[in-house]
Image: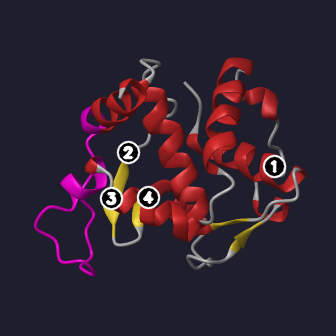
């Protein structure tokens, strides 16, 4: 199983290498979708981290805490990642899987990805009972993520 910080750094490197910028909001959503689709494809968890249903969509508390000086729309650059990061710390299979998810989701902005998560069952279910702008740290169910995205594959 990969480490979420390594997957995060890998995403930043991949997007930077392709000339794309990633901000905090977008990074959280891309990480969420890599985990969701890993579950949906029956691969199990890509990394050991759960996502919380925050106002602006799924958030990894670990990644949030990693960038305390950043705001939602702050860019994450190569200067922000672990200077010792080596993409070989992630298996070639995991890198290929993340690359596939990025092909689909990286073209979207963080705001677009936020809108997408807001109409999907896992986030909606985890936010049940919370007002639209109310703070919530409810954990998004991985079983709901798995079933919801698996159904999207098949339907």
Boundaries of the magenta span:
122-144
Q: CA distance from mark 4 to mark 3?
A: 6 Å
Residue at image location 48% in from the left, 37% down from the top: 35
Look at the numbered disc 4 and give the secondary structure of its residue: helix
- Which corner quadrant holds the C terminus? top left
Residue 91 position in % (x across, y down): 70, 21
Dot in front, 4 or 2: 4
Asked if residue 138 lies in the magenta stretch, the reply is: yes
Q: Residue under circle 3?
A: 119
Q: Is residue 5 above or below residue 27?
A: above
Q: CA distance from mark 4 to mark 1?
A: 24 Å
Horizontal side, residue 57 vs residue 133: left or right: right
Look at the numbered disc 2 and give the secondary structure of its residue: loop
Q: Residue under circle 2?
A: 50
Q: Residue under circle 1?
A: 13
Horizontal side, residue 61 vs residue 68: left or right: left
Q: CA distance from mark 1 to mark 3?
A: 29 Å
Q: Residues within 10 Å of mark 2 (few under 14, many from 20)?
A: some
Residue 48 visible at all: no
Q: CA distance from mark 2 to mark 1?
A: 23 Å
The quadrant holding residue 41 is top left
Q: CA distance from mark 4 to mark 2?
A: 19 Å
Q: Residue under circle 4?
A: 116
């Amino acid at each position: 199983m990969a480490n979420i910080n390594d997957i995060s750094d890998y995403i930043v490197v991949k997007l930077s290498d392709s000339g794309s910028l990633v901000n905090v909001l977008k990074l959280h959503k891309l990480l969420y979708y890599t985990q969701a689709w890993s579950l949906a494809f029956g691969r199990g968890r890509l990394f050991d981290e759960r996502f919380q249903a925050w106002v602006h969509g799924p958030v990894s508390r670990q990644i949030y805490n990693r960038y305390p000086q950043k705001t939602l729309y702050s860019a994450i650059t190569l200067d922000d990642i672990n200077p010792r990061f080596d993409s070989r710390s992630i298996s070639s299979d995991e890198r290929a899987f993340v690359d596939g998810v990025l092909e689909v989701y990286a073209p979207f902005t963080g705001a677009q990805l936020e809108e997408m998560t807001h109409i999907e069952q896992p986030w909606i279910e985890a936010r049940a009972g919370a007002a639209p702008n109310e703070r919530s740290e409810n954990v998004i169910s991985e079983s709901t993520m798995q079933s919801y995205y698996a159904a999207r594959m098949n339907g």
